[in-house]
Image: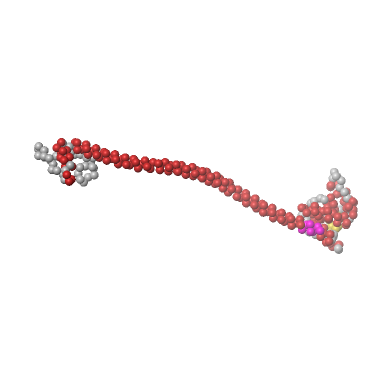
Amino acid sequence: MSDNDRRVFPMESALGVVTGKGGGEVLDFLGYAVQRDICDCARAAVSPAVKGWLYSLNPEFFKLSLDDGMDYASWVAQQKQKLGDNVSVTPMPAHEAEGINALLDFIEHTMSENEEKQAAADAAQAELKALAPFKAKAEDLEKKLAQLEEKNKALTEEASKLKAELAGYAGKVAINEKELEQSVKDLVSRAVKDALAALPVGAAAGAGAGAAAPGGAAAAPAAVDDGATAAPPDDFGFGASGPSDDGFGF
């Protein structure tokens, strides 16, 4: 590999790889090493291999250690005094980066699937949120429908009871009509008797004799002392007298 393939990085970037730090400069260093972009989610998978490759380039990095409780900025300053401000590196050989690239392909594929699933879940959540008011309205309509069904059931039962009661009254109404008809006949009969009783004695006898003549022929009216024919009184019957009226007159 020629010197043109080399790249110079700040010593802080190389030290960040060695200590497992993150940040844009560390990701840039890792990406150059494997010759592809590296996201922070893949940093933990790539860092160990790049660290080993960095050790092979400069064994001095293998000797470095960061003690617990030590200030990181102070430690970096100390290492720069020993190793310099910058480091010049070449990309990892293709055969060494092959396994890392396969791992990165798997990570990227998994992330893509997760993003698609998350997008679908977000869309479904948004749809549910948009439909929430309609769901509440549908539930309210279901409650009202149930109430109407109960009311309809009660009204149907009440109508059935009323129908049964009316059926019982139907026969009674028919009997009352017959009784009413008989009452009318009785009233007419009494009225006729009362009217005949109100006639003068000779007229009443003549009416009775005429009604009793054989063969239905009326007998000649009997004569009175003054020679005049008796006439029914003006108030005879139930209304106007005469054959052309309907007042039950005679």
Residue 32 is at least partly visible in this image: no
In this view, 193 is above or below 18: above
The spot of residue 70 in percent (x, y) is 85, 45
Q: State the residue in front, 126 or 183.
A: 183
Quadrant containing the N terminus is bottom right
In this view, 39 is above or below 2: above
* Main secondary structure along the magenta-highlighted residues: helix
Indicate whether residue 16 is drawn in magenta.
no
Quadrant containing the C terminus is top left
The spot of residue 82 in percent (x, y) is 90, 51
Which residue does the image show at 19% across and 36% down from the upper left?
197
In this view, 6 is above or below 79: below
Residue 161 appears in which quarter of the rendering? Answer: top left
Residue 248 appears in which quarter of the rendering? Answer: top left
The spot of residue 49 in percent (x, y) is 83, 55
What's the magenta region? Answer: 99-105
Is 53 left or right of 178, judged from the image as shown?
A: right
Which residue does the image show at 14% across and 43% down from the upper left?
219
